[in-house]
Image (spheres, rainbow, N blue to C red):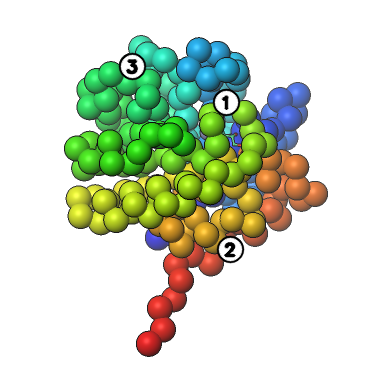
Amino acid sequence: MSHLIAPSVLSADFANLQRDIEMINSSEADWFHVDVMDGVFVPNISFGFPVVEAIKKHAKKPLDIHLMIVNPDQYIERFAAAGAAVITVHYEACTHLHRTVQAIHATGCKAGVALNPHTPVALLKDILVDLDMVLIMSVNPGFGGQQFIVNSLNKIAELRAMAAMVNPDLLIEVDGGIGIHNAALLLNAGANVLVAGNAVFAAPSPTEMIAALKQVEGRLVQHG
Ligand code: DX5
Ligand code: ZN
């Protein structure tokens, strides 16, 4: 599988949301990355159901919903009804993570689990087989436009090795501080879904930036 590009709507112009959604529709992007923040789990508030529903109304590609909220179980069915294809919850926000993952699957959505930069990937060992995706946060969640945390590369490689045993089709998504300068490193470490907010929306041509991220070469070719 070639890697997927998921532009983060958080960096879009909310006064021109339909225009920015149409830009993603007609680009080489694969998913819409949709960041929901509650002001409790993270020190920022983004948007809720009305905006997700408005995005869904115009989006022609799957919605990848990243829930940075406490008690995500309470809202899974509503996000599924609002149009999610993938629902990702934070490991740090779920006491009964296995139950939460089951609840996501019961809606028909793919289930992802996100890890904050300080959370070791080893903690996912006994749930990895049940997941469609793991999201490695490569910044502290809450804001776009932050600097990439380099240790994320070690986490991706460790997770890819763990997944090879039990879940070789696992999607590994990386989110935060991603751009053309580090995309190849991330893919080579084992990631296959790249989120990009600022890199796309602050580019002179967001469409061309998406195309450039999509065309980055993945795995290193082994010679000899
Ligand atoms: C951060 C969000 C990200 C954010 C990424 O908490 O989860 O999805 O939009 O933005 P950039 O690519 O600008 O770091
Ligand atoms: Zn995100």
Q: Looking at this view, is 86 or 72 the one in front? A: 72
Image: 115 above or below 194: above
Image coordinates for residue 185, horizontal then vertical, percent = 52, 59
Q: Quadrant of ligand 1?
A: top right
Name the amino acid type tagged 1. Gly
Hey, which quadrant is residue 131 in on the image? top left
SS type, badge 2: helix
Mark 1 CB within 8 Å of ligand 1: yes
Extreme-bottom residue of the structure:
224
Give the label on residue 73, or none: 3
Image: 175 above or below 140: below
Q: Quadrant of the C terminus?
A: bottom left
SS type, badge 1: loop
**From the viewer's perspective, is 170 left or right of 138?**
left
Extreme-right residue of the structure:
204
Image: 223 above or below 204: below
